[in-house]
Amino acid sequence: VVPLFSSCLLGSQGIYDRQYTTPIGINWLPHLTLAEITQSLQSLRSTKKQINSNPQFNLPKRLWHYLTDRAGIKSEQKWAELSKQNLKEQLHQCQLILTGKGIFKEEFVTCGGVDLKEIDCKFMSSKLVPNCYFAGEILDIDGITGGFNFQSAWTTGYLAGVAIRSSRRHH
C-alpha cells in the first residue's frame, strides 16, 4: 500500500504552525482510478460473502476492518447489500485528522539548507559552483525524521556519488 498524504504539502513547518492538528487525505489505492475502484466494488455485489471477512485490493485485514467500519459497514453485512459510495470514499479519499505529536512527544525535523532551485537534482550538483555537490540534510528538504530524512540522504548521496565518479572518469 502506498498511500498519498495530502497534508505533506504543508511540510513540517506548516504542521507546526497548526499546532500539530491538520486534516489529511489518504488515497489507499493510488494505483487505481476511482472508476476502477467502483467497478471492482460493483463486481463483488454478486458474491454472498461478508464484506468484513473478505478484504479486497490486497489491503491488510486490520486496515480493511478500519475502513469498512468508517464506511458504516456492519460486521455481518454482505457484498450484495453494499452501498459502495461510503467504502469507495474511504478507499480513494479517506479524510483523517492528524492530532498531536508522535509517541515520544518530541520534534525531530529537518528543514532549511541549500535551496533546491540552485541544485541540478539529477546529479545533486550546484548550478552556481562547478564541481560542488550536495546531499542529505544540507539540502532544503523539509521533512519529519524517522526514515524520510534517511531515505533522502541515501538517495541524494547516491546520486552525488555517481555523478562525482562519472565526472572524474572524464578528467
Image (cartoon, helix red, strand yellow):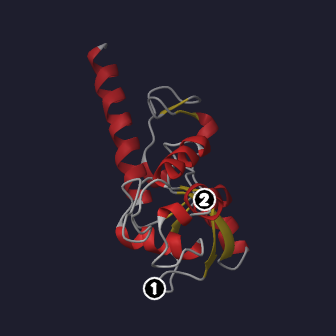
Quadrant assignment, res 103:
bottom left
Q: Is residue 137 left or right of residue 11?
A: left
Q: Residue at x 50, y 25 (%)?
A: 130
Amino acid carrying label 2: it is Lys
**Looking at this view, is 68 or 63 the one in front?**
68
Rounded to the nearest whole Å, what is the CA distance between mark 2 and mark 1? 35 Å
Say few, some or many: other residues with alpha carbon within 10 Å of mark 1 (under 14 / 14 to 19 / 20 or more): few
Residue 125 visible from this viewpoint: yes
Q: Which mark is residue 170?
A: none
Q: Quadrant of residue 112?
A: bottom right
Return the residue at label 2. 84
Residue 115 in view here: no
Return the x and y of residue 92 as percentages of the image width and height: 59, 54
Q: Residue furthest top?
A: 170
Residue displayed at 51% across by 86% down? 105
Amino acid, disc 1: Ile
- As helix, strand or loop, the secondary structure at mark 2 comes to helix
In the picture, the quarter occupied by the N terminus is bottom left
Q: Is residue 16 above or below residue 142?
A: below
**Secondary structure beneath label 1:** loop
The image position of residue 51, as x and y in percent, is 44, 67
Could you tell whether 7 is left or right of 2 in the image? Answer: right
Task: Give me the residue at 69% from left, 72% from top.
Answer: 22
Q: Which residue is mark 1?
A: 103
Q: Residue at x 31, y 13 (%)?
A: 170
> Closest to the observer: 122 or 59?
59
Q: Residue furthest right?
A: 18
Residue 159 % position (x, y): 37, 35
127 or 44, nearer to the observer: 44
